[in-house]
Structure formats: structure tokens, C-alpha cells
Amino acid sequence: MKKDSIIFFIIIFIQNAALNFVHPVTPTLINNLQLPSYTFGVAFASMATSSFLFSRLWGYLSSLKDNRYIYAFGCITYGLSQLLFMISTSVTQIIIARLLGGLSVAAIDVSILNYLVNISSVENKSKNFALFTGLSVIAGSFGYLIGGYVGNNNLRYSFYSQLIVLVICATLLFILGNKKKETKKIDTSKIISYLNPLISFDNSYKSSLKVLLIITFLASSATTIYEQTFNYYLNDILHFMPSRMGEIKAISTVLILLFNLLFSYKILESKKFKRNLSIILILCSFFSISLIFLNNLNIFLLSSYIFLALNALHTPLIQKRVTDGFNDEILGTYNGLKSLGWIVGGLVAGFSYQLYFNLPFILTSLLFILSLIILNMIKD
């Protein structure tokens, strides 16, 4: 592996860990403020809304400018937005903080995907995407574990740690990362159009690409509903401490790593895209709905671990397929639809949980089934 790729993956591992420092303490923060249970969904949906609105703009800017600057802006601004989240005392204040966070995380996501594609050759693209996904999941769980223990006694320590580490990551990539050889001027007349979410779905895309982008939205919605509900469920129903939630996340990472080592690269290189993705979607649907029938805690957790491991497989598969006919701006559209899934998923998770705590798991299963049906609209 080249030196620039090694540097990139090390920085991204640290960054993804830091982005998860606050997740295990968020349910406790909301419960301590005695806010409605739907707040966790609204907070996430607020972040996702601004991420959706700005993703295409960041995609446009990253196709013209050095991604190191966009990445640095995203990391620093996100860390500061989290401090606003930390000191919030009402739902309105939380929404404002998370809107700023979404703008920032969109800059991070789009810039690192573009950076990864730019340093990848045709030969190692599959390996790099598999490694990127695997490291992101592992780092996320590692950060979740660290954040849980750091915030066990004082929730604010998790927020402070996140800001410090993200600033370090921004600095490292700026100093050690590859400088873009050629930059272009920004056409200010295009800025407004790229902020219009109604045109984020380009009619010039091939029908097969449109189907993949729809599946991206549906799978993102399903994943968000599950993850947001599961995290809150552990604290609200099972009364787990942040450190215990971090341990559960760490255990799931081991399974995710194992699944990635055994299946990810083979699936990415396989020519049977539809068959492989169909199997993953069916299994995700089964294990998500199985949770509502399991009364034994250990079996419940085991089923959730398997779901999370399977769920990590469809993302790199779709990413690679979408970027096979690569242009820089398509990643902005891809990230925008993924963010739209976050919006829908966050809202559905929060309000459906308010109605019945098992309803989100049922809806997750149905969305994966719908994705499967739409997938089979693609002609072989």
C-alpha cells in the first residue's frame, strides 16, 4: 500500500472513532434533561436534514477544490457544533446544534470519499472501499467504547475529547495529505441550484443508477431507524450505562470485522451484484424483525450483533457500484440521498418508538424488503 493511502486510513480511523465519542452518552443526556423520548429521533433527523441540503454543494466544491480544506472545515465545525449540543437545554436548542452538525458532517463524508477515490487506482479500488468500510465500522465501535467510559462519570468529557481529536485529524490530513494538483474556480451561479434538494436526483442518470440511489435512501432509512432505536432502547428499556453500551458496540465490531474479512472483498469482486445484495437485504430484514420475538437478553443481543454485521456489507457494495462510472459530483448526490435516509429514519425512529417501542424494528424489516423488491427492477 502506498504511503498516502496508509496516512489516509490512519487519519480516517482516528476521525471515525472521534465521531462516535458522544453517541453512547446522548440517550443519557436527553433523559437527564427530561425531554420527550422522540427527541433522540428529531435530533438525528435535524443533523441529517442539513447534511442532505448541503451534500450536493460539498460534492460540487470538492470536485473543484482541495478536499483537505473541506475536510478541515467539516471536522472543526462539527466539533464546535457538538459543544452547542452539549450545553443545550431544550429541543429547539438541540435542533439548532444538530443542524450545524449536519452541515459539517456532510463536508467530512463527501470530502473523504472523493479523496479516497482520487488516491485509488482501478486495480485497488475494491480493496480500498472494503478497507475503508471495515476500518470505519471498527473505529466507530472503538470510539463508542471509549466515549462510553470517558462519559460514564461526566458526560461533558466525551464532547471535549471529540473536539480535540477532530482538530488533530483535520491538522494531520492538511499537513500530510495529498494536495490537489489542479483546482478550478467556483461558479457562484451554481451555488443556489446545488442547495436545492428537489433537483438532487438528476434525470440524466441511467435507470439502473436511479434504482441504486433509491436503494441507498431506503437502506439508509432502515439502518438509521434500527441504530437510533437500538441505542435508545438499551438505555430506556434495558437501563444500560454508557460503558455497557460501549461494550456491546465493541462486541458487534468483532463480528463486523469477521464478516468483512470473510465476505466483503469477495462480494465486491463478484459479478453477481444483484444476487449478493438480495441475500444481504433478506437477512437484514429477518434479523431486524426477529428482535421483537426474543425475550432472552443474550439471544436478543446475539441477533442484534448478526444484524449489524450483515448491515455493514451492503454499504461498500452499493458505493462501489455507484462509483464505477465515477464523476466527483455523483458522490454528492449519493451522500445527499443517504442523508435523506437519515432524516426519514431519525424521525420514524423517534415517533414510532413513542407509539410502541418495537414498531421501529418492524419498519426496519419492511424497508429492507422494499429495497429487495426495487433491486429486482434492475435488468441483469
Image (spheres, rainbow, N blue to C red):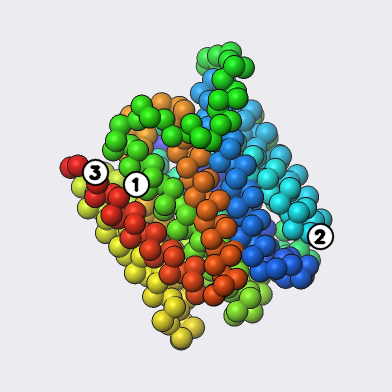
Within the image, what quadrant is residue 286 found in?
bottom left
Q: Which residue is mark 1?
A: 317
The percent coordinates of residue 95 (x first, y second) are 71, 51
The percent coordinates of residue 288 (x first, y second) are 41, 69
The percent coordinates of residue 108 (x first, y second) are 59, 39
Looking at the picture, tell me which residue is in the foreground, 220 or 204: 204
Q: Secondary structure at mark 3?
A: loop
Sequence-first disc among 2 and 1: 2
The percent coordinates of residue 23 (x first, y second) are 63, 60
Looking at the picture, tell me which residue is in the foreground, 38 or 220: 38
Q: Which residue is mark 2?
A: 89
> Which amino acid does the dot numbered 2 rest on?
Thr
**Number of marks drawn:** 3
**Between tags 3 and 1, which lies in front?**
3
The image quadrant where one finds the C terminus is top left
> Which amino acid does the dot numbered 3 rest on?
Ile
Packing grade of label 3 (10 A; few <14, some 14-19, many >=20) is some
Q: Which residue is mark 3?
A: 378
Packing grade of label 2 (10 A; few <14, some 14-19, many >=20) is some
Q: Secondary structure at mark 2?
A: loop
How far is mark 3 from mark 1, CA to CA? 15 Å
Q: Secondary structure at mark 1?
A: helix
**Residue 119 visible:** no
Relative to 125, say whether 87 is above or below.
below
Q: Is residue 274 left or right of residue 145?
A: left
